[in-house]
Image: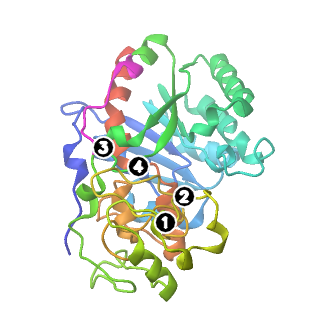
Amino acid sequence: MRRGPNWSVRVRVHFRGQMNRIAIDLFSGSGGVTAGLKAAGWEVVCAVDNDPVASSTYRANHPEVEFIEDGIEKRSTAKAVVRVVAGREIDLLIVCAPCQPFSSQNRKRGNDPREQLILKSVSLINRVRPRLIFFENVPGLVSPSYRPVLEALRQRLRRLGYWMTEPQVKDAADFGVPQRRRRCIMLAARSKAALDAFQAVRPSVSRRSVYDAISRLLPLESGEAHPTDPLHKARTHSEIALRRLIHIPRDGGSRKSLPAELELACHVGSNAFPDVYGRMAWHDVAPTLTTGCNDVTKGRYGHPDQHRAITLREAARLQSFDDSYVFEGNGSEIARQIGNAVPPAMIAELSAAFEAALMDTVK
C-alpha cells in the first residue's frame, strides 16, 4: 500500500537536546492534538475524553499515554489526572472542548449545557497549574452570544494568576493542513510577555493542496475498495447520484451545472447549500471537513476527478493524519472522528509558538 505524505517529517524539531516538553490533552477525541504534539517532540502524559469510540482510537495510537475515559467535570477525573501528573511540572494543557455548542448550526445556541464545559476545565487547571493553557474551538465562540462565557473564563483564569489572549480566528490551511478550516484559538499564561511571544510567531510552512494530499492514492470507482487499506473504500452511489456526479465538471465543479431533470427538488430555484454535490479542486485546499465528510449530499466532498465522494482515507489525509493512524469504529463513526479532529499538522506547527511562550512565562 502506498503511504501518505509524511507531513510530520517537515515539522521543525524545537526541542532537540532538551528534555521533552510535557502536555495534557483534554477533550482529546481520537487524538489529533496528541499526534501533532508528539510529531513536534512533546511528551503527552495524560489525555481525557468520554466518547467510547474515539477513546478506542486514541488508545490504539497512543498506548504510552495515561488515558482517562470520563468527563472532565467529575472530581474523580481531576483526581486521576493529578495522580498521573505526580507533581511534575506541566508545560502545556490543551482544552479542545466540544465545538457543537458554539456552532452556527446548533439550534440550542445559548441554551446548550455543553457551553459550560470550557469553564469546567478551570477546576482541573487549578489542580494541575500548567505553565500554558491553549484553547481551540470554532469561530462561533467569538460571537456576541458567547461573550459572557469568554469573560467568565477570563475572570476565573485571572483569579488563578493567568492572563489570556483575545480570541484569534486562524485558518488551519496556513499551518500546513490541506484544508480550509477556520478555528478560534486562545492562550493563557502567567505573564503577558508569554502571550506576546506566542502571538509574534508566524507559521513557516507552505500551503498544501488537495493534489498534494490525495493525488497518488489508488483511483477507485463507486463501490470499489483498496485491496489492503480498509479506509480507502468508495461509497456505493445510487444510479441517480452517479448521473449527477458525471454532469458536474471535474476539478471544482458545482451542482449549478446539473441539467434541470437531475436537480434535487429541494434545490430548484434555491441557492441554499451550494456545495452539495460539488467537487474539490485539485490545486486549492479542501473545504472544511465535517462529520459527513465522505458524503456528497453533505457538502463539497466529491472527488476532483473520479465520480464518487472522497474516501475516509482521503478525508484523513486532508485532516493531515498519516496513513499509519488507526481509526476504530464503523464507517460513520470514523467519519465523525475525522470531521471532529483537530488537524495534527496545525498543532505541530503551533509548537514553535508554544515554545516561544514558554521562554517568557513564569514558573
43 with respect to 287 (left or right): left
Q: Which residue is mark 3?
A: 176
How far apart marks 3 and 4 lie (CA) works out to 9 Å
Judge depth for marks 4 and 2 and give the one in front.
2
Q: Which residue is mark 2?
A: 274
Instruction: State whether residue 308 appears in this view.
Output: no
How far apart marks 4 and 2 lie (CA) works out to 25 Å
Q: Looking at the image, is mark 1 or mark 2 earlier in the sequence?
A: 1
Judge depth for marks 1 and 3 and give the one in front.
1
Asked if 54 appears above or below 23 in the picture, the reply is: below
Q: Which disc number belongs to residue 343?
A: 4
Identify which residue is drawn at 69% across, 38% down.
120
Q: Which residue is mark 1?
A: 255
How far apart marks 1 and 2 lie (CA) works out to 7 Å
Q: Looking at the image, is mark 4 or mark 2 earlier in the sequence?
A: 2
Residue 91, image quadrant: top left
Asked if 91 appears above or below 10 in the picture, the reply is: above
**Horizontal and vertical percent for residue 144?**
71, 29
Amino acid marked by disc 2: Pro
Element type at mark 4: loop
| Front-lying residue, 85 or 340 | 340
323 with respect to 146 (left or right): left
Amino acid marked by disc 1: Arg
Judge depth for marks 3 and 2 and give the one in front.
2
The prevailing secondary structure element of the residues shown in magenta is: loop
How far apart marks 3 and 2 lie (CA) works out to 27 Å
Identify which residue is drawn at 62% across, 39% down.
140
Q: Which residues are magenta?
A: 197-207
**Horizontal and vertical percent for residue 97?**
60, 44
Could you tell me which quadrant the C terminus lies in? Answer: top left
Amino acid marked by disc 4: Pro
